[in-house]
Image: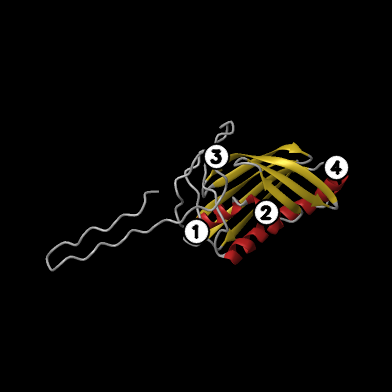
Amino acid sequence: MSTVKEVVDVEVPVHTAYSQWTQFEEFPKFMEGVEEVKQLDDRHNHWTTKIGGVKREFDTEIVDQLQDDRITWRSVGGDTHQRGSVRFERLDETHTRVELTMEVEPTGMVEKGADALGIIDRRVKGDLHRFKDYVEEHGGETGAWRGRIRPGDAGTTETPGTTGTAGTPGMPGTTGTTRMPGAPHTPHTPGTPGTRGTPGTPGTPGPLV
């Protein structure tokens, strides 16, 4: 089994970098050789890849996911055997360090040949740099999922809420919701000024999140 590790600093807040990575169906836009990713539920995705003209299909399961911190997964069926994790570290308000680690077990002559030539290593590292370009170009996430998946949860998912634009808290979530952009937060309404020496009327607070 080959191990690939790469680190890249992206010029977006940690909230944005993490949220964009949760949009698995957009992976083909920056991952070489990935033709399609279908999200089956909060924990499972179906992948279709093509390397050296050889098409493979497999499923992955998320085993640990904590917002703005990490996502860990493993393959659970199909032609490809892999596991990996991506971690997010806040550097400052507008910069995030993203660390990708993958362990891949090549199957078939084409994949084993690609591994021997270092093609898989270069492709995975290139994917992370293309993610950097992709998220920086957009300047914000195209969607988000802010749920919590714990190891050994046996398929249950804790979903505190979904999120829309960067830095905007989402609405309260429900268990097992799909990864969708959430409703934006409603700001507080300022109070009405009173007469000289008289306090104004308190404003209306926004919804709790």
**Image quarter hosting the N terminus:** top right
Q: Is residue 4 above or below residue 141?
A: above
Which badge, 3 or 1, is on the more N-terminal residue? 1
* Residue 205 image label: none
- The residue sitting at 49% across, 41% down in the picture is 174
**According to the image, label 3 marks what residue?**
176
Distance of label 3 from label 2 (alpha carbons): 22 Å
Q: How many marks?
A: 4
The label nearer to you, 3 versus 2, is 3
- The residue sitting at 67% across, 39% down in the picture is 74
Q: Are marks 4 and 2 in contact (CB under 8 Å)?
A: no
Helix, strand or loop at label 2? It is helix
Q: Is residue 193 left or right of residue 174?
A: left
Which badge, 4 or 2, is on the more N-terminal residue? 2
Distance of label 3 from label 4 (alpha carbons): 36 Å
Helix, strand or loop at label 1? It is loop
The location of residue 35, given as percent across then percent down, is 75, 53
**According to the image, label 4 marks what residue?**
108
The location of residue 87, given as percent across then percent down, is 58, 49
Distance of label 3 from label 1 (alpha carbons): 22 Å
Q: Are marks 1 and 4 in contact (CB under 8 Å)?
A: no
- The residue sitting at 64% across, 58% down in the picture is 131
Which badge, 3 or 2, is on the more N-terminal residue? 2
Distance of label 2 from label 1 (alpha carbons): 19 Å
Q: Residue flagged by tag 4: what amino acid is it?
A: Gly
The label nearer to you, 3 versus 1, is 3
Q: Nearer the viewer, residue 70 or 50?
A: 50
**According to the image, label 2 marks what residue?**
27
Please tell me how crowded label 3 is: few (under 14), some (14-19), or many (20+) other residues with Cα within 10 Å.
Answer: some
Helix, strand or loop at label 4? It is helix
**According to the image, label 1 marks what residue?**
166
Which badge, 3 or 4, is on the more N-terminal residue? 4
